[in-house]
Amino acid sequence: MSNTRKIGRDAGNGQFTTVKEAKAKPKTHVVETIKTPKKR
């Protein structure tokens, strides 16, 4: 299981969006890969 996930973010105001929307609007959105914390 991978411990990373992708999120979409609006580059102007920083709000979270869907990855689908971020890929559709690359000039105004960013797809970020973030690490998820490991379970103890």
Image (cartoon, grey):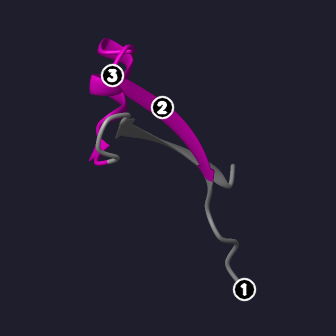
Foreground of the two, 9 or 5: 9
Residue at left offset 31%, top offset 35%: 12
Residue 2: x %, y % from top left:
69, 49
- Residue bearing mark 2: 31
Image disc number at residue 28: 3
Residue 32: x %, y % from top left:
53, 38
Rendering quarter of residue 3: bottom right
Which mark is first along the chain, 2 or 1?
2
Rendering quarter of residue 29: top left
Q: Quadrant of the C terminus?
A: bottom right
Answer left or right for 16 relative to 34.
Answer: left
Contact check, label 1 and label 2, Cβ < 8 Å: no
Foreground of the two, 16 or 18: 16
At label 1, the amino acid type is Arg
Answer left or right for 1 relative to 23.
Answer: right
Which mark is first along the chain, 1 or 3?
3
User: Residue 20 in magenta?
Assistant: yes
Contact check, label 3 and label 1, Cβ < 8 Å: no
Q: For the magenta stretch, what is the residue range?
A: 15-34
- Distance from disc 3 to disc 2, alpha carbons, whole Å, reads 11 Å
User: Residue 29 in magenta?
Assistant: yes
Residue 11 sits above or below residue 21 on the image: below
Residue 20: x %, y % from top left:
31, 25
- Residue bearing mark 1: 40
Residue at left offset 37%, top offset 31%: 19
Which of labels 1 and 2 is toward the front? 2
Which element is circle 2 on?
strand
Foreground of the two, 22 or 10: 10
At label 2, the amino acid type is Val
- Distance from disc 3 to disc 1, alpha carbons, whole Å, reads 37 Å
At label 3, the amino acid type is Thr
Residue 37 sits above or below residue 35 on the image: below
